[in-house]
Amino acid sequence: MIRVLLADDQTLVRAGFRSILSDEDDIEVVAEAPNGAAAVAAAREHLPDVVLMDIRMPELDGLEATRRIAEDPRLGDVRVIILTTFDLDDYVYGALRAGAGGFLVKDTEPAELIHAVRVVARGDALIAPSITRRLIAEFAGRVKRPEPGPELNALTEREREVMTLVAGGLSNDEIAARLVLSPATAKTHVSRIMTKLSVRDRAQLVVIAYEAGMIVPGWVTS
């Protein structure tokens, strides 16, 4: 059973998401929160698998709430999906860097919402990787890029290759096929990369890849 926390200051939005998700046999909405502070508190109380987090909320916005959840060692297994209007939220890039596992636009189709929750719950891949890649590329071009950290030097040539493919939106199975590896080996490479770079999930790997110049805006996996 996938346990979900809904965090949005609009009651109707929460009710809509609850209605969609509660119809699924493998998903349970365990709590709701009208602001970021309540979302962090509810995450600590209920330990959900996935938090659907709006960015623009009173008291504490979704960006800071996401950061607090990501930094709390007790919430290491909690994954955050950012809810965004896509064309308005300049905070999305920061939210992904803070530890969000991906994002959804608020008018997403019900089937896409359900699929996203399942994907992020198992930590398998980004949500809509091609869209996420374009969004990160857009915002990465607006911010000052820091110098690549020394931790990147710890990556092997193969790990750098795998990380570039992750940033291109490929799943573990697709990476395995591209590099002629077993899916288990591809998954091991990704796990080792995340450990070396001290990141929670693939979304942060994508951000780091852009900031380090390993992949550039407009790059498309062929």
Image (cartoon, rainbow, N blue to C red):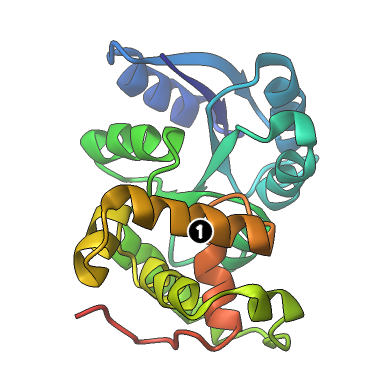
> Picture coordinates of residue 66 (x, y %)?
68, 45
Judge whether 58 appears above or below 210 on screen. Answer: above
Give the residue number, with chain letter if any, for mark 1.
203
> Picture coordinates of residue 141 (x, y %)?
54, 87
The residue under the point 22% across, 35% down is 111
Q: Left or right: where does residue 157 sit relative to residue 35?
A: left
Q: Mark 1: which amino acid?
A: Ala
Mark 1 surroundings: few (<14), some (14-19) or many (≥20) residues within 10 A: many
Q: Left or right: where does residue 90 sit relative to residue 221?
A: right
> Picture coordinates of residue 121 (x, y %)?
44, 33
The residue under the point 45% across, 84% down is 215
The residue under the point 30% across, 45% down is 108
Judge whether 99 appears above or below 114 on screen. Answer: below
Quadrant of residue 192 within the rendered picture: bottom right
Query: Foreground residue, 76 or 179?
Result: 179
Q: In which quarter of the image is the C terminus?
A: bottom left
The answer, for residue 88, to whether it is visible in the render is yes
Query: Foreground residue, 22 or 76?
Result: 76
> Picture coordinates of residue 115 (x, y %)?
28, 36
The residue under the point 26% across, 41% down is 112
Secondary structure beneath dot 1 equals: helix
